[in-house]
Image (cartoon, grey):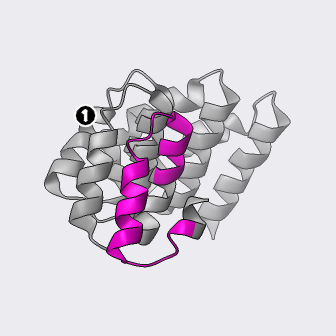
């Protein structure tokens, strides 16, 4: 629904319409708005401010979506600081998304490597998949995680093994 209301544009009415949905009482509506917001808002400073605010939301799904959305903008210093704070979030998916966004925006991989280590050692397949997909997209930046990814190639879960193998294959290109 949000994508139909606000196609890729910088139309202030559309941007404000999606921004209003960031305050919706439903965490699912907020998460959907967060996914759409960086695609329609061409003002990175405004987007960074709105996304950083959502990193403080009580709902972990909203915080995870906000950290994920930060990858798609050029964040301000304040937004990068909010992402660094999110590395200590109680919810691991928030930490993964924050680590991914920070690495994409130039944070030294060594600073976020512990988050990916925690995620790949997690017993939650969703967390492992999120970490593996982030590492795959980070490419050579994530080379220090090679041994961890190779360990996942031996995972008892065939799905996790397949994704880990795909990560290594992508890195070898």
* Element marked by disc 1: helix
In the image, residue 58 lies at what x, y percent? 38, 25
Specify the quadrant of the image occupied by residue 87: top left
- Work out which quarter of the rendered image holds the C terminus and state it: bottom right
Question: Badge 1: how crowded within 10 Å, few (<14), some, or many (20+)?
Answer: some
Name the residue: 43% across, 49% down.
Answer: 21
Instruction: Give whichever of 95, 171 is nearer the camera.
Output: 95
Residue 144 forms part of the magenta stretch:
no
Query: Image check: 91 left or right of 80?
Result: right
Q: Which residues are magenta?
A: 5-33
- Work out which quarter of the rendered image holds the N terminus and state it: bottom right
Q: Farthest left residue?
A: 77
Q: Farthest right residue?
A: 158
Residue 17 forms part of the magenta stretch:
yes
Query: Image check: 168 left or right of 49?
Result: right
Specify the quadrant of the image occupied by residue 111: top left
Name the residue: 19% across, 43% down.
Answer: 81
Instruction: Give whichever of 146, 166 is nearer the camera.
Output: 166
Query: Image check: 2 left or right of 68?
Result: right
Query: Image check: 107 left or right of 153?
Result: left
Kindly report the secondary structure that dominates the magenta region of the rendered protein: helix
Instruction: Give whichever of 165, 28 is nearer the camera.
Output: 28
In the image, residue 56 lies at what x, y percent? 30, 32
Residue 114, visible in the rendered structure: yes
Measured along the vertical axis of the image, is residue 147 above or below residue 14?
above
Instruction: Give whichever of 8, 71 is nearer the camera.
Output: 8
According to the picture, the residue beneath numbered tag 1 turns out to be: 85
Name the residue: 23% across, 53% down.
Answer: 49
Measured along the vertical axis of the image, is residue 155 above or below residue 23?
above
Residue 83, visible in the rendered structure: no
Measured along the vertical axis of the image, is residue 100 above or below residue 8?
above
């Amino acid at each position: 629904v949000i994508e139909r209301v606000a196609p890729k544009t910088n139309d202030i009415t559309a941007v404000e319409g999606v921004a209003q949905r960031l305050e919706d009482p439903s965490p699912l509506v907020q998460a959907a708005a967060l996914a759409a917001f960086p695609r329609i808002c061409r003002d990175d400073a405004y987007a960074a401010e709105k996304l950083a605010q959502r990193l403080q939301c009580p709902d972990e799904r909203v915080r995870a979506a906000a950290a994920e959305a930060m990858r798609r903008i050029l964040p301000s210093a304040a937004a990068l600081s909010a992402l660094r704070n999110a590395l200590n979030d109680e919810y691991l998916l928030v930490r993964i998304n924050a680590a991914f966004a920070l690495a994409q925006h130039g944070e030294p991989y060594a600073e976020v490597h512990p988050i990916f280590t925690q995620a790949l050692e997690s017993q939650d397949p969703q967390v492992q998949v999120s970490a593996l997909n982030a590492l795959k997209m980070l490419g050579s930046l994530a080379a220090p995680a090679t041994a961890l990814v190779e360990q996942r190639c031996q995972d008892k879960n065939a799905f996790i093994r397949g994704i880990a193998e795909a990560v290594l294959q992508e890195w070898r290109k």
